[in-house]
Image: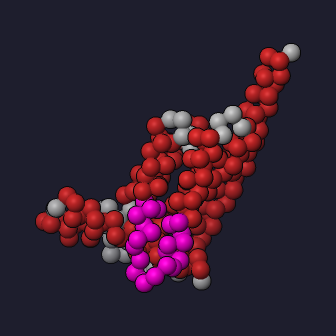
Amino acid sequence: MLFHGLCSESVTTTLHYRNIFLKIINVKNRKNEFIRFGSFPHSYWSYSTFRAVLGFISYGKINLKVLSGKLYFYATAITSFTALGISKQGGFNAGHVFSLFILVLVTVAYWLHATKKSSTKARYFENFLWSFSFFLSLVPAVNETFTRVPIGHPLAKDINDPIIGQTLLVLFVLFIIVAVFQYFKQKKINTKLGAELKSRVQ
């Protein structure tokens, strides 16, 4: 029930971004088009997801040393921070918890990157936090897409539809695989760095 609550609130949150966008660019004549096709309700998450995928392809992780990693951090942080003030229900609720958790993940990961540059052990935690935040960011993306696409005949009736749960399960399994891959890749890098440091000392 809590997971469904998180999903429900995250969908409500993404709809808010569409309304903000329409007000900012003042395109009233295209408002119905955006509502019909849902072209913007998930733009921040879509952008951060795109950047994360680039990082995974290029480096096997979200790399804050390069532009794609930095943009992923900023896009995700802005989305999560903004979502804290949005909810279809009054008071602090599951949607706020979801957004706050993602914000905490990326903040801690950024802190590790900025303050623990020389710590090889910190890289394990940093890599995991970036990947976990990415997985959680996919939850509202899947909910929004499956309940709106294709237009008129969406893949899912609502967030409780089995296809959404099955898709999220597949994504979770992929996240575990990626996390394991990153662990062993980082271990190999750390071993190499350790050997180089040892050779310099000798």
Q: Residue 183: where, in percent of width, then height?
A: 73, 45
Q: How is the image coloured?
A: secondary structure
Q: Is residue 176 visible?
A: yes
Residue shown at 52% from the left, 59% from the top: 103
Q: Nearer the viewer, residue 92 or 54?
A: 92
Examine the rendered structure and indicate whether residue 19 appears above or below residue 196: below
Residue shown at 43% from the left, 67% from the top: 83
Q: List the single residue furthest toward the left.
A: 29
Q: Is residue 146 visible?
A: no
Magenta residue span: 79-100
Residue shown at 44% from the left, 45% from the top: 71
The quadrant in which the N terminus is found is bottom right
Residue 2 falls left or right of residue 121: left
The image quarter containing residue 190 is top right
Residue shown at 16% from the left, 61% from the top: 26
Whether residue 156 appears in magenta in the rendering, the answer is no
Q: Nearer the viewer, residue 48 or 89?
A: 89
Examine the rendered structure and indicate whether residue 115 appears above or below residue 152: above
Whether residue 80 appears in magenta in the rendering, the answer is yes
Residue 46 falls left or right of residue 56: left
The image quarter containing residue 20 is bottom left
Residue 19 falls left or right of residue 124: left
